[in-house]
Amino acid sequence: MCGDGAYVDALPMTNSAVTQRLRLPGGRPFHLILLSLAVSSCGDWLYNVALLAFVFQRTGSATWVALTTAGRVLPVVVLGPIGGVLADRYDRRRLIIASNIARALLMVALAAVATLGLPVIFAPLIAAAATAISVVEPPCVAACTARLVADSELPRTQALRAGIGQAAIVAGPALGAIVLLASTPAIAILLNALTFLGSAAAIVSIAPGREFRPAAHEAGAANPRVLAEIAAGARALRGAPAAIRLVAADVLCSAVYGLLTVTLVLISRKVGAGDSGYGLLLGAFGVGGVIGAVVTARVEAAGRWRRTLACALALVGVPLAALGLAPTLPLALGLAFVGGGGMVVGEVLSETALPRLLDDSVLARAYGLVFPASIAGIVAGSLVAGPLLAAFGLTGALAVAGLFVLVVAALLLHRPLAAQPRGREVAIPA
């Protein structure tokens, strides 16, 4: 990684230093939150494969598949800010548990739709309901993490969370494919219900405490209107220009991912891998993301963020432009691996910066805006893929997209990024 200095001393590390590196950040409560995330994330990707397979089997229509995908994505974009408000109003431990149990019940209902031959319209409706119920979890986890983990361990912490998400992209679809080979979409969907119950069980085993109560709840403050609370989260973000630039980089990388969900099919065919190469290329991005998260965990000083992010966005833009020129599958896989490593850095750095730059009392509401923006980036990237391909062809579209990433990176990083300790006023030039 590019940085403003050495990451570690030149002297050999002692045994205690090695142990510190290997130890998970935080204590048992945070470790259980990580376990909950790992189980449910893997189940989500397994379920995505099964859900789309079921809908296509029943309808044979790509339009129905697109409608179902929209049902899984749009509630996050629309309701995400409300999830942040709820996370700043109610006990976060209870919210996460309730969300997981409700989604488990919805998965049972969806499996019944698949098994009993009920109208297929129920599939996107249930998928949308499950996503709507899930919007409380990301801001709850983000706010709890900032309390359960020391400030010095935040980079490693956010890298672990990102690594779990990237690993789930690789493991979840693979597990889903195996389950579908041996059984039916209904069985795979029921397995996802079990992952939600397992996720809830992990959180239930954490003792209740102040770490899960929002600041307003602790102070006994009255709850203002929802829109006013959302506006407060937006003002907090506007008051931290460095956070906005890091979040913008994350959204940019999400848009690249959305673009790739469309173009990787064409790249796979271009390099002679057929439709099966799509999964391999997507998996290569996921593996690269896991490695990128591990490397980013070593970036612990705010002064290194600017150059680190510059390197990361270069690792996104250049391979993206080169993918359209790749003549073979191995080369395309290598470029995907490098690009995946760069894409995860923006996510890790932005989620590390938010709890450092924003006050604890507004963190969940701000994250309730940031997370939907990232998902909206995926949607925007997938929607712009068609016009780009029509205008420039595959090679030209990827070259234009890669150049756009590099130009936006230069605009985002034209001023230094700085961080303030938690609870202090942010004074960073816009």
Image (tube, rainbow, N blue to C red):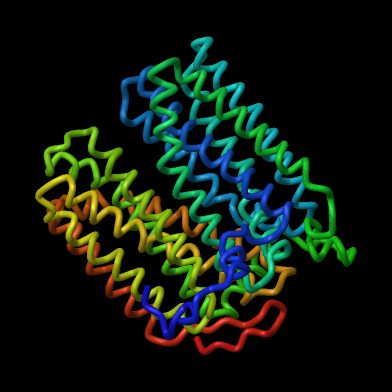
For the point 45% across and 33% down, the residue is: 48
Above or below, 92 relative to 155: above
User: Residue 274 location in percent, x, y?
Assistant: 17, 34
Residue furthest to the left: 327
Specify the farthest residue to the top: 116
Toward which corner of the image does residue 100 lie, by quadrant?
Answer: top right
**Does residue 277 appear in this view?**
yes
Q: Position of residue 58 (x, y in %)?
A: 39, 17
Residue 86 seen anywhere in this rendered image of the structure: no
Asked if residue 33 lies left or right of residue 344, the reply is right
The residue lying at 49 percent from left, 45 percent from top is: 74
Q: Nearer the viewer, residue 225 or 55?
A: 55
Return the x and y of residue 141 as percentages of the image width and height. 66, 54
Q: Nearer the viewer, residue 324 or 35?
A: 35
Indicate the quadrant where residue 359 lies.
bottom right
Count of numbered tags: 0
Farthest residue to the right: give it: 220
Q: Is residue 313 left or right of residue 14?
A: left
Image quadrant occupied by the N terminus: bottom left
In the depicted view, which residue is nearer to us: 407 or 125? 407
Q: Is residue 216 above or below residue 394?
A: below
Q: Nearer the viewer, residue 378 or 337?
A: 337
Quarter of the image for residue 99 reads top right
Q: With respect to residue 407, does 194 lie above or below?
A: above
Q: Position of residue 193 (x, y in %)?
A: 60, 28
In the picture, measured across the screen, residue 241 lies left or right of residue 26, that is left
Q: Residue at x 55, y 68 (%)?
A: 155
